Amino acid sequence: MVKILKYELRRLLLNKFFVSLLVINGLFAWYTLASDTVAGIAFTAPFSSWSFGAYLSSVMPMIIITVLFLLTFYHSRKEKQVEILTAATPVDAFRYMLIRNTAVTLGFLALCFLVIGLSFYFYAAYFDFWNYSTFVIPAIVTVVPCFVFIVGAGHCVGRIHPGLLYFLMLVSFAMNFVQIPGEFDLFGGGYYTSAPLTLPAAMDGEPAFMLSAAFLAARALYLIIGVVLFVVSIRLEKRK
């Protein structure tokens, strides 16, 4: 099991392709911080939880596209031929998919640590802000449901046809420019940019950070759908 995981990590992450994607994500994240986040979101401070959540929602499409690129390694035509050999190994389909998705998850975490680390440096260097504990909740509710949903959907469409993964990348990119009702925005940007405008200002002059029941329900729904799609892809793997 450990040897298989090391092989998947070496194949998926320890290569020039993934390093290039890391650089692209880092450059895009810094551009977002310097151009959008620096002015604050919806009349809130740049270092407010609202602005941080909006920042994460802005960089998530690029991160998700990178994750979908990683999934293409597992659903290419060449990989389909290799699966004939891997099917003869003593590792069952469920464990094999878990190992593969562990590698994908580690790649995703590396991307998240990069963009979040850049934001921490940005806040410290430009605003002398260090209270990062306030960002934990927006980070979790933004990142986790989005990742689980996309991985589940990516495996399902990739099993139907590898080309659909590229279509899913296009959809993820387009969703960053389409106005989706705040609570149901997959990346969360619609909520972070609209909700503060409807809330009263607190003592510090900006609305207190809060998550509506509708927004939390939508995040839970994306999470559940992602898990269901992942289970379906495992069943399809076993059946094959």
Image: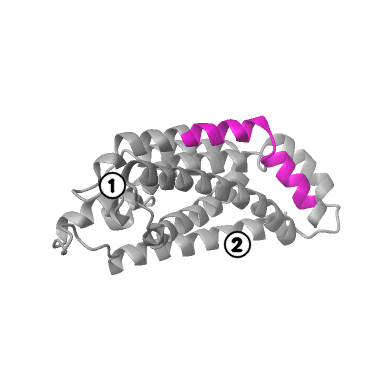
Which residue position is annotated with label 1? 46
The crowd level at tag 2 (other Cα within 10 Å; few <14, some 14-19, many 20+) is some
Which residue position is annotated with label 2? 231
Q: Is residue 16 magenta?
A: yes
Determine the residue located farthest toward the bottom in the rendered image: 213
Give the structural element (helix, strand or loop) at label 2: helix
Q: Is residue 158 visible?
A: yes
The answer to whether 35 appears left or right of 205 in the picture is right
Residue drawn where x is 25% and y is 45% of the image? 40
First to last magenta residue range: 4-26
Which quadrant does the C terminus fall into? bottom right
Above or below, 137 against 128 in this view is: below
| C-alpha gap between disc 2 and disc 1 | 39 Å
Q: Position of residue 80 (x, y in %)?
A: 73, 41
The crowd level at tag 1 (other Cα within 10 Å; few <14, some 14-19, many 20+) is many
Where is residue 36, by image quadrant? top left
